[in-house]
Amino acid sequence: MAESERARAPLPGEQGLGIKVWGTAIMICVVAGFLIWPMVPPSLPESIRIGTGPDGGVYARVGLRLKDRLADQGIDVELVPSSGAAENVRNLLRDDEPLDLALVQSGCISEAEATRLRSVASVFYEPCWVFYRKEKKPAAGRGALLDWRIAVGPPGSGPNELAHRLLEGDDVEMVEIGGMEAVRALQNDEVDAALLVTSIDSAWLPPLFEDPRLILHDFPLAEAMSRHYRFLKVIQIPRGVADLRKGLPPQDTTVIATTASLVMRRDTHSGLVPLLIEICEDELEQGGLLSEPGEFPSEHHVDAPLAEEAARYFRRGPSFLYRYLPFRLAHLLTRLMLLILPLLTLLYPLFKSAGPLYRWLVLRRVYRWYRVLRALEAELDQVSDPADLSAVEKDLERVDEEIRATNVPSRFAADLYQLRQHHRLLMLRCHSLRDAAG
């Protein structure tokens, strides 16, 4: 082997210690990664089920919009129609094929049900519209509609639930039909009034506003009702807001309103929350006929507890990654950070200590001989018999052979040569003592 090649070649055993030290550190990180990985949130689901409402209703339209926007993120949405908010709540809580997400009207979730659900955000107001025929007149007092046949929506719908709360104890006949069926029944004099809970842009309202035989009920005790039922809000319906050209409704009207919210199961993937709020912000940021710009989506007016991710979003806004990167990429990097940050916390002290540990293990090969040399030096200090001097000399020669067999990396060679120099000094002293004795 050429001289230059011998200079570059590692000494026997030089690489083994480094491999052991750094390999152990890497192995610890790998094991820690496997232990941490189950705690990392799973990737976004490929498909979800969203509960909407009757075909042609506002919930159905909102569901279609959500489906389109979520499809842009690679999430397939199955829209599940229902009779309304109350049925959506039941479908969220069922054990077989439950919904992941649903539109729910405020006041439809009981306290017991709320513990099993989480709110994402409230998204729009749903006024309670009560239309009645002109020849009818609401009863005095708290504004109850006595002796009337009222269409209150089908069983399982939000209007039906609300009607049973508000009209409990009143002498009314509740006809459980809703939507366009209720509109036609009112126009055909089959009922005296119709109670509809829907947004102002619902397709069911224009025929009622335009019918001169019908009047929109003004709630005289709306403020008091909102104090007794905290899920209700007082809304002023300005004259002409439904149809500016025709001036409908023909006068300012005070109504009570519920709020529609996006509600999810507790086990629904939490990574969907910022995406859903972001979609709602894009869709609702300009406001509407009954809401101010930026009023929705909101953390207020929800029945179920707000999801932690939603509370964090409303408090701080989207995180840095979600603000500047596509959602799926931001979610992936967020998941990786949840894995990498704990590993970095482990890696920093681990790799910081690996270097000193490696140095200590290498120098230990050198320094352990100093204990032997000190013991032999002590024997030399006490020796008086030449026979004893010969025994110490033999021990020094044996130690010299073992020191020469010691291998250390090149950068620690100075320590090894210094050891050999100190050993040589003891040998010279031993020889001097022998010469003096002889």
Image (spheres, rainbow, N blue to C red):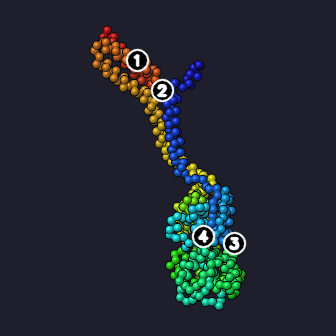
**Residue displayed at 31% across by 12% down:** 387
Mark 2 crowd level (few <14, some 14–19, many ≥20, 10 Å Cα): many
**Residue displayed at 31% across by 20% down:** 379
Q: Nearer the N terminus, badge 4 or badge 2?
A: 4
> According to the image, label 2 marks what residue?
408
Query: Helix, strand or loop at disc 3?
Result: loop
Query: Residue 87 has which mark?
Result: 4
Q: Residue furthest front?
A: 96
Kindly check if marks 3 and 1 are in contact, taking CB atoms under 8 A apart as contact.
no
- Image check: 182 left or right of 139? right
Query: Helix, strand or loop at disc 4?
Result: helix
The percent position of residue 43, horizontal first and vertical second, equals 60, 53
Query: Is residue 73 shown to the viewer in this render?
Result: no
The percent position of residue 386, horizontal first and vertical second, equals 30, 12
Give the distance between the C-alpha atoms of the residues marked 4 and 1, in whole angstroms: 91 Å
Is 319 situated above or below 339?
below
Kindly check if marks 4 and 2 are in contact, taking CB atoms under 8 A apart as contact.
no
Give the distance between the C-alpha atoms of the residues marked 3 and 2, in whole angstroms: 82 Å
> According to the image, label 1 marks what residue?
398
Q: Residue furthest bottom?
A: 135
Identify residue type, mark 1. Answer: Arg
Nearer the camera: disc 4 or disc 3? 4
> According to the image, label 3 marks what residue?
56
Give the distance between the C-alpha atoms of the residues marked 3 and 1, in whole angstroms: 99 Å
* Residue closer to the observer: 127 or 249: 127
Q: Nearer the N terminus, badge 3 or badge 2?
A: 3
